[in-house]
Structure formats: structure tokens, C-alpha cells
Image: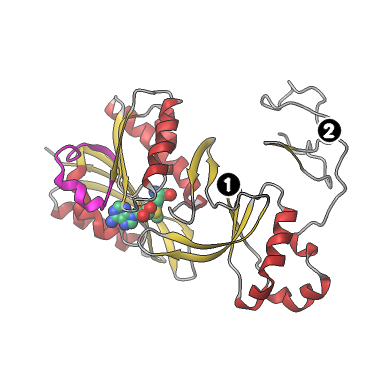
Amino acid sequence: MLAGWLAAGVGIQSDGDHRLLPLSDLAPADADAGFEGHAIVRRPSLERGPQHWRDRLDPSLMETLDPFLPTAHEVQGDVLLVKLEPEVEAHEKAIAQAMLAQFLHVRVVCVDGGVTGPYRIRDLRVLAARGADASTETTVREHGLDYSLDPATAYFSARLSREREGAMTLIKAHQAHLGRRLVAHDPYAGVGPNLGLPLQNGAIEVAVVGDLNGQAIPYLRNNLSRIISKSAHPEARLVVREGDGREWQHDPDVNRQADVLFVNLPHEGLNHLTDLIPLLADDALVLGWALVDRHQEGAVAARVHAVFDAAGWQANVDVQATKGFSTTRTMVRLVVRATTGS
Ligand SMILES: C[S@@+](CC[C@H](N)C(=O)[O-])C[C@H]1O[C@@H](n2cnc3c(N)ncnc32)[C@H](O)[C@@H]1O
């Protein structure tokens, strides 16, 4: 929708599974004129409600709690995750109700105790739900693709959403370079978002995906099978493995096959590289993300280079900071083009 077509100061309405966006006088009255297949319907406009969920709290509460109220939250599908300071815990239900009233597309509000353990899953507690369904299972839409998941049992984050778009561009270039569809391995796949776009695009012939977390596996399998079935190459083969990615090297079925390898284990993936190199085909693209100290891109590149060198591979290594994580740490994107030189 073009700038200026959205009516200012008028609420978005819900209508079953649809959301109704209010149009201004500048928007064309004809649905064929740029609404990408969306229909135009007529409804009385909503009175403008409070602009922020905080405005729905009791004013006396607001006065005492203001410095401690959350200033950010995350939404996955229709599940809202919010971190709460201890000072506001006694009023967590009122906060959750205010959020439910404000965000009409949210079904469940949970307090987020942070990411824990090797599976990087959230410590969640449901505070309030709209209706009877208080499950944290939900569906997230990213780049037009649906991923079912439960943030309480399997990792997902939209933080790398842009990165996954960038990965798609690199994969297409690698496909053009090899002149065929690719074999792609994603041993730390979570619920599958790295390979969604490449599969949908038809760039992949075989996707071998896995995770150590057994609870991620059904989501991973279902999400990617569904994407393949509606993709540009529905014959693509999906192999799903549960377990430690470092063990894949011992399986001749997956050894030396990967034209593309994802290493998406930001806290310790760099330590896994030696165990993952045996998975690579002769002319391979490795895409990884790592959490490192700020301004260490050069040192990380040298380290990765040394790992490939020790394994007898020639590697072109590019390491770029993507975004800050804290004042001292940053996420880096790793792009390695590796050849055996044979
Ligand atoms: C940062 S998440 C990335 C998930 C997914 N690629 C994404 O972007 O949403 C890392 C994933 O690796 C899994 N994991 C952790 N250690 C592992 C290991 N040794 N082998 C395989 N998977 C592992 C975790 O359960 C988690 O799902």
C-alpha cells in the first residue's frame, strides 16, 4: 500500500481471520488499483482508543509502576512475549490484560524469563489469553512463508529474518555457479527458517536438516514439507535428523555432499567447524552466524581460515558484523567459499 493511503487516527479492525486497514481519501476506491488482491469493504470507523497499552492501566498504578513497566516486547505469531521487572510482577495480570486489549491480533500474553539451555528455548509463563486457547503454539509468517512453532519448546527468532533474505541471494548465486539445484545441510535448523526461502524458490534438490532438540523436529519436518509441496520444485527431497550436528560427519549418506552448509549456532558454532567440514562437497558455500566480541571480525576470519587450512581446504572467508547484541558483543555473518583444490 502506498504512503498516505492509510487513514491516520482510525483503528485497525478484526474481521474473522482478516484485519481491516482503514483507508484515507487519498486511496483509490477501486480494489484493482494496487491492493494486491485484497478486497475493499465498508465498515463504520472505530473510535480512536488509547494509543499505548500503558494508557489502559489504572492511572494510580501507572504513577508508581511507570519506571519499571516494560518498554519492549516481542510477538511471535499471535503470542506476545514480554520481560517483566520484579517490581511489576504483582501487577502482571493487569499488564497482560492491557496488552490483550491493545493488540487485537495477540491471543496469548506470556512473561518471558529469557532463553535457556542448549536448545535456546524460552522460559515462558502464560499470563492471559483471549478466549479458551492458552497454548503457546503459534504460526509465524516470514517472507510470506508460514512456520508453526512453540517458543516454549523450540527456538525461533525473527532477528535473523533479514539475514535469511541475504542468504537466499548467496544461494541463488551458488546455484548459478554450479549450474544445478543444490544439496543443503542445516544441522542447527530449529523449526526450519533458513531453508524456507531456498526451498520455496526451487534452488534445493536435497535438504538435510536437523536439531538436537527433539521437540523442534516435528515442527521442522512439517514446516519444510509444507513449503516444498507448494514450491517451485515439489520433488525436492527432505531428510530430517534428530541429534548432534557434529555426529553427521560419521554418516556416509551425508558426508561430502553439502553444496551449502548453514552453521546457525551463534554461541558455539565456531567450535563446531572442524566437525562440520567433512560434510562439504568439493565446491561449497558455508553460511554461519556467530556472537563475538565487537570489532573482532578480522580475528574471527583468521580463525575460520586456520580451521579450513588445517583440514586441507582452500577457503575464501568473509566476516561482517550484522548488528550489535550488547555494548560488548556483536553478531557476525560468516560467508565461506570452500574448495578442496583437487
Ligand atoms: C540459534 S538456534 C537456530 C535455529 C534456526 N536455525 C533459526 O534460525 O531459527 C540453534 C539451534 O541449534 C540447536 N542445537 C544446539 N546445539 C546443537 C547441536 N550440538 N547439534 C544440533 N543442534 C543443536 C538448538 O536446539 C537450536 O534449535
Residue located beneath label 1 in the image: 77
330 vs 277, left or right, is right
The quadrant the N terminus occupies is: top right
> As drawn, is 221 to the left or to the right of 123?
left
Q: Which residue is mark 2?
A: 26
In the rendered image, the vertical position of residue 328 relative to residue 6, given as above or below: below
The residue at the point 76 percent across, 38 percent down is: 21
The answer to whether mark 2 is within 8 Å of ligand 1 is no
Helix or strand or loop: what does disc 2 sit on? loop
Q: Amino acid at mark 1?
A: Gly
Residue 199 counted in the magenta span: no
Decide which of tag 1 and tag 2 comes sooner along the chain.
Answer: 2
Query: Can residue 256 be found in the magenta stretch?
Result: yes
Q: Is residue 66 toward the left or the right of residue 187 in the image?
A: right
Q: Is mark 1 within 8 Å of ligand 1?
A: no
Q: How many marks?
A: 2
Residue 209 image offset from top left, x and y in percent? 32, 42
Label for residue 204? none
Residue 67 picture location, percent across and down: 70, 76
In the image, which residues are magenta?
242-261
For image coordinates 49% across by 54% down, the residue present is: 151
